[in-house]
């Protein structure tokens, strides 16, 4: 058995000569200059270069991606062999993250979130004004503060009763949301 320190020390002391390759032929310049970009006729569109979508060339062993015991690491294939949806998977995730970042709450504790909400509200109002929908700009009275009677009759049809139940459920959710917001606010103020 050899000591690893001894092997490393021996390898460090031993200098391998670097092979140098010299070209014996001389380069002659041709009469026609070499252009870095190919030329095309005036009416012809330039051909797009074939770009590789993956970061590793075909045949590269992908170390560490094997998940079966005793199996071998997978080998990269040509870009054409992979399904088309694979190349857009990460784009969908980025769009979802961007949508989450643009959220904002008017009543948030964070000043940044409040600014985002105000900016989003102003953009929405400008869009509605441009469309000419002035009814949508009218201030909305919260459902729990409206003074309307809920639909439904004692001898009404089943559809009327279902509609009344839906309205009651909607009102209950709105009231619960308002109560939660008040509790959050009071807890925040108590902590100050």
Image (tube, helix red, strand yellow):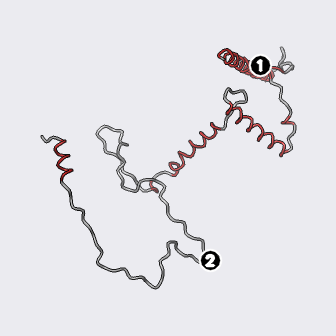
How far across and down, in percent of the image, does residue 18 sit? 24, 62
- On screen, 18 above or below 60? below
Q: Nearer the viewer, mark 1 or mark 2?
A: 2
Cα distance in 3D space between marks 1 and 2:
71 Å
How far across and down, in percent of the image, does residue 170 sit? 75, 22
Q: Secondary structure at mark 2?
A: loop
Quadrant that contains the N terminus: top left
Q: Disc 1 or 2, which lies upstream in sequence?
A: 2
Q: Work out whether residue 26 or residue 81 is closer to the camera in this orientation and state it.
A: 26
Q: Secondary structure at mark 1?
A: helix
Q: Residue at x 47, y 58 (%)?
A: 52
Q: In screen coordinates, is 111 left or right of 33?
A: right
Q: Residue at x 70, y 30 (%)?
A: 105
How far across and down, in percent of the image, does residue 68 sit? 34, 38
Q: Residue at x 20, y 56 (%)?
A: 15
- On screen, 166 above or below 102? above
Characterize the local packing of mark 1: few (<14), some (14-19) or many (20 or more) Cα atoms within 10 angstroms. Answer: some
Res. 3 image quadrant: top left
Circles 1 and 2: CB atoms closer than 8 Å: no
Quadrant that contains the C terminus: top right
The residue labelled by disc 1 is 168
Q: In screen coordinates, is 63 left or right of 183?
A: left
Q: Which mark is residue 42?
A: 2
Res. 113 image quadrant: top right
Res. 26 image quadrant: bottom left
Residue furthest out toward the front: 13
């Amino acid at each position: 058995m050899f000591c690893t320190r001894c092997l490393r020390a021996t390898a460090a002391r031993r200098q391998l000569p670097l092979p140098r390759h010299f070209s014996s032929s001389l380069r002659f310049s041709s009469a026609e200059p070499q252009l870095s970009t190919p030329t095309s006729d005036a009416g012809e569109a330039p051909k797009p270069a074939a770009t590789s979508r993956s970061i590793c060339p075909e045949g590269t062993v992908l170390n560490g991606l094997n998940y079966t015991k005793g199996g071998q690491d997978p080998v990269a294939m040509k870009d054409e062999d992979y399904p088309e949806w694979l190349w857009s998977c990460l784009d969908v995730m980025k769009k979802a993250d961007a949508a989450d970042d643009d959220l904002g709450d008017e009543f948030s504790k964070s000043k940044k979130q409040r600014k985002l909400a105000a900016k989003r509200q102003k953009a929405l109002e400008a869009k509605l004004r441009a469309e000419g929908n002035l009814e949508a700009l009218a201030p909305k009275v919260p459902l729990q503060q409206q003074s309307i009677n809920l639909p439904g009759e004692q001898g009404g049809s089943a559809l009327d009763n279902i509609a009344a139940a839906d309205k009651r459920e909607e009102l209950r959710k709105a009231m619960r949301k308002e109560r939660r917001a008040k509790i959050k606010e009071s807890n925040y103020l108590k902590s100050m």
